[in-house]
Structure formats: C-alpha cells, structure tokens
Amino acid sequence: MRAQRFMGYAYLAPYLIGLIIFTAIPFLTSLYLSFTSYDLMSSPQWTGLSNYERLFTRDRTFEKSLSVTLLYVFSTVPLKLAFALFIAAILNYKIRFINVFRTAFYVPSILGGSIAIAVLWRYLFSTEGLVNMALAGLGFSAVDWFGDPTNALFTITLLRCWQFGSAMVIFLAALQSIDKSLYEAASIDGAGKVMTFFFVTLPLLTPVIFFNLVMQMVQAFQEFNGPYIITQGGPLKYTYLLPLYIYEEAFKKFNMGYASAIAWVLFAIIMVLTLVAFWSSKKWVYYAGDKRS
Amino acid sequence: MTDISLAKTSARTLDEAAAAKRARMHLISSVVRYALLFGVGFLMLYPLIWLVGASFKTNSEIFSGAGFLPQSPTVEGYVQGWQTSTPYTFGRFFWNSFLIILPKVIGTAISCTMVAYAFARFEFPFKKILFGSVIAVLLLPNVVTRIPQYILFRDLGWLDSFLPLWVPSALAGDAFFVFMLVQFLRSLPTDMEEAARVDGANSLQTLVFIVVPMLGPALVSVCLFQFMWTMNDFLGPLIYISSVDKYPVSLALKLSIDTTEAFEWNRILAMSVLTITPALVVFFAAQRYFIEGISAGGRKG
C-alpha cells in the first residue's frame, strides 16, 4: 500500500512541479506585486494600497476599460450561448447531413482564435469592406464599424459569436443523450413543442448550460486578440478591454506592479462571478438523479 | 343508419384533414429548418470562402465587389507575401511554428497521460484536494499569473527562446487535457489492467502497454487540440519572443500588417490563407476526434 501511494505521486510529479512553479508561486507573487511599484530594473518597492487607490479613484482609463469589459462579456456570452443552443436544437431534429452541418458550424471555432481571422475581420468591417458592400447590395447605407464606439465593440462580439461551434457541439451531445421516453410522456400529457422545450429539454440541459456559461465567461473576460488586432482598443478606448490594458501596462510601459493590480481586480471579478454561478447552480442546475462523480 | 354513416365519413374526412394539415405543418417546419441551417451555414462560411478567393485577386479588385471569384486570378499576393519585408520568408516562420508545436504537443501528451493515470488509477493522500486544484487551474485566468511567469522566465534567462512556451505544457500545465483524460480513463474498465498486474506487469508497464493503447482516441484529441491552440496562440509568442528570426506565423502575420505599406491587402490575405491551412487540413483529416473531444469535455464529471 505504501508503494501504491508513492507510485501515485510519482506519476503526479510533473503536475505538482508545474502547479507549484508556474501557477501557485506566480499567483501569490502577482498578489504581492500588486502592492508594489516595480519596473523590472530595480527591485519592487512596497507601496501599500496606492495602486488600488489610484485604480479606483483617479484612473479614468481603468474606469472606461472595466465598464467596456463588463459590457462586452455580458453581451457576448448570452448571445453566443443562445445562438449555439438554438442551432443545436434545430440540428437535434432528424436532420439529414447532420454531420456536414455540424462540421460546417464547427470550422469557425477551429480558426477563430487565429490572427488570420482577426485580420480578416479587420478587412470585413472596414469602410469599403465586404460587410458594407453586402449592405450596399441590399440597399442599406454603409456603417462606420470602427469609428463608432458601440459598433466597434460589436465587431468583436460578432467574431466570438461566429465561433459558437464548440458550445453548440456540447449542447448537441447533451440533447442527443436525452431519454426519448421523456418526450413521449410530455406529449401524452398534452405538452406542445414549446412547452416541452422549456419544461423538459431546458431543465435537462442545465448542467451543460452551466458548464458552457462558466467556461465562456472566463474566456470572454480574457479577450485579447480581438481588441489588439481588430480595433486596437479604439475608438477612444471604447474597445480597450482589461486584458489589453494589462498587457500595455506590463509589457509596453513595464509598470509590473500596477499591471498586477489591474490583473487582480480582473481576477476578483471573474472569481466572484464564477462563485456566484457555482452557488446559484444549486438552485437551477438539475442533475437527473445522477450521483456519479 | 344514414346518420351513422354520415358521421363516419365526416370523421374520416376530419381525420384526413388533420393528417394533411399535420403533414403540411411538418413540411413547412422542415423547410424552415433547412433554410435556417443553410442560411446560417452560408453566413458562417462565406467570409472564409471569400478570403480564399480574395487572396488570388489584385489589390484593386479586393475592394470592388463582394463576389469571391477573382476576375483575373493572380498569385502575386502569395509570391510577395511569402517574401515578407524581413530578411526571412514565411517558410522560416512556419518552421518556427513547427519547432514550437512539436515538443509542446509531445510534452503535453506524455505529462497529461501520467497525471491522468495517477488520478484515475491510484489512491494517495490529498487526492481530492489535488484533483480540485486541476479544476481550479482550469478556471484560473492566465492573466493573473502571466506577469510573475514573465519575471521568472527572465530570471531563468529563457526570454526570446521557445522554453517558456514548451516547459509549462510539458509539466501538465494545460489542466483541460488532464481533466479530459481523467474523465475518459475513469469510464474505461480496469479488468485488462488487473489481468496485466496479475501477470506481473508493474504500473509503468501497465500504463505503456495497456492504458495508453486504450486511451488512443482521447490522446489523439489532446494532441490535435494542443496543435490547434499552439498554432493559433498569439499572446504567448508576443510576450516571450522578441527576435524576428524566431517568430512563429502568428507574429509574422501581425508584423506583415504593421509593415505593409498602405495595406497591400492581397499579400496579407494570401498569408492569412496559408496560416489557417494547416489547422484546416488537420481538422478535416481528423474531425471525429475534435467533436468527440469537445463533447467529452462537456460531460459532467
């Protein structure tokens, strides 16, 4: 039994080393750095709460960046998930060529994170780009996508919604695993399609909705490529999401202490929202008598 | 008598009418469904189709219409884009991407398999807490550890090398893969492994000869996802790689936007097509593994 225990740790070793060196220590170090002033040249100077004080009282950029980030996350995540669920629900009917559709819808998820797609997006929404040409063809006037604050953020939202494929695949797998007899029972009880969806399908999907919600939210809060390549944070910092702000503070201006403080605020927001999701999940996530762990 | 037969006929016609109505509704709803799927699919894929077409257009044609077929196809974009404005060609950048990806994928596969084996097949103290830490790392935003990691790599003298991109992954740093493999391994029966143990195989032999072959498809998913994510990774190289001769394709593409005069769009679009090609090829060759991997990741654990 002793040997067994030792063997367990032997196989676990890479993970433990990585966990300590690349996650645990950096995690605590960044908390420490957030209370210092550190430019990489001289050693960190303890400055107490002054970074946080500056963030919350004097930093207009932070104020804007935070509100834009929240707006981005709270619009992108629900839109993307609703769309993914909608398409998954359609594919769940006896659709012919279901694999072809599923593959086609999944392709953007494969490519979406790449710089090439961000570059393509920048072209698509430029003043003389494809989207405006298409709008002109349909008789609409051209839209100034990158000059207008709301539109600029919306182009990034669209890019991420375009990648609804992985959330959709998860929804579809869950939909297909729903016991068909439940639908028959609902139909015998006289429930229509809409009723069945809201009272049978949706409750059974809550575990995957919860999973997708948390994963997509954590991801959305860390959006970097979109604002960095497509909008460059503009116009007037209306797409200056927090990760971009942290990047520029840390790796352009080398204000490591201040950047760490912003990172910790971002982390705190993500953590609180994740905990709220986990805590509230007891009330709305339904595990069909499944106690397996 | 007549009343009854009359009632019967009317009942039948009512039934038929209802059936016809149902069939019509069914037809309409399936037409709507297919129309929606085709519409959405078209909107999704048209930008990509257009991208490929536009990469063979001249610069003036790119902004002149929304069609994707080039009027006078030219490979000028590819030829000039490949040369870049640096002393290196895109071949060099693809080679760099390959040098980053290969060790990273191998390291990920080996380390994550070992760790998943430990969690799924061994009992040891603090197992619950440690598995909890996998979930915590999975949800931990990288943004909070990035700055100290950078300082650590600087102190180790690893900046401007591929080590910061390789080493954390080779130490099972991508918790998603550990989680995925543990889930998969737990769902597999253990009788083969027990038989091997009875025959005198030690745990390492069991891992290599019994568990790894059974893990096959899941392991392929892990490698494919890691390949894809590394190919697309931008922020990692952006922070750690500073000399152009070590740039992977993602940075090289960004560089070519910054340095291309007045936006020679066809060069940039042509290079964009080339950068997404490996990912697309791998995806179409092995899409089953992607779909299964993603679905497995979403299963409740």
Image: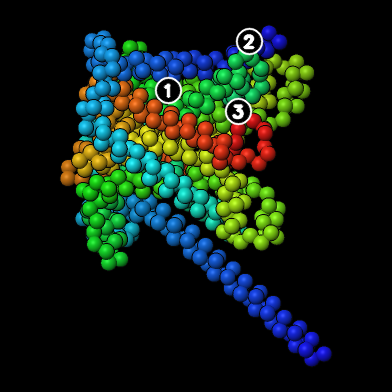
Name the chain letter of the residue that bears numbered label 3: B
Do residues under tags 1 and 2 come within 8 Å of each other at their CB atoms?
A: no
Asked if labels 1 and 3 share a chain, the reply is yes
Judge from the rendering whether residue B229 lies leftward or rightward of residue A52; answer left or right: right
Residue labelled with disc 3 = B182
Whole-percent x and y of residue A56? 27, 27
Say what amino acid the circle numbered 3 marks: Val
Q: CA distance from mark 1 to mark 3?
A: 22 Å
Q: Which mark is residue B49?
A: none
Say what amino acid the circle numbered 1 marks: Trp
Name the chain letter of the residue that bears numbered label 2: A
Whole-percent x and y of residue A232? 24, 39
Viewer-closest of B11 and A14: B11
Q: Secondary structure at mark 3?
A: helix
Do residues under tags 1 and 3 come within 8 Å of each other at their CB atoms?
A: no
Q: Earlier in the sequence, mark 1 or mark 3?
A: 1
Q: Secondary structure at mark 1?
A: helix
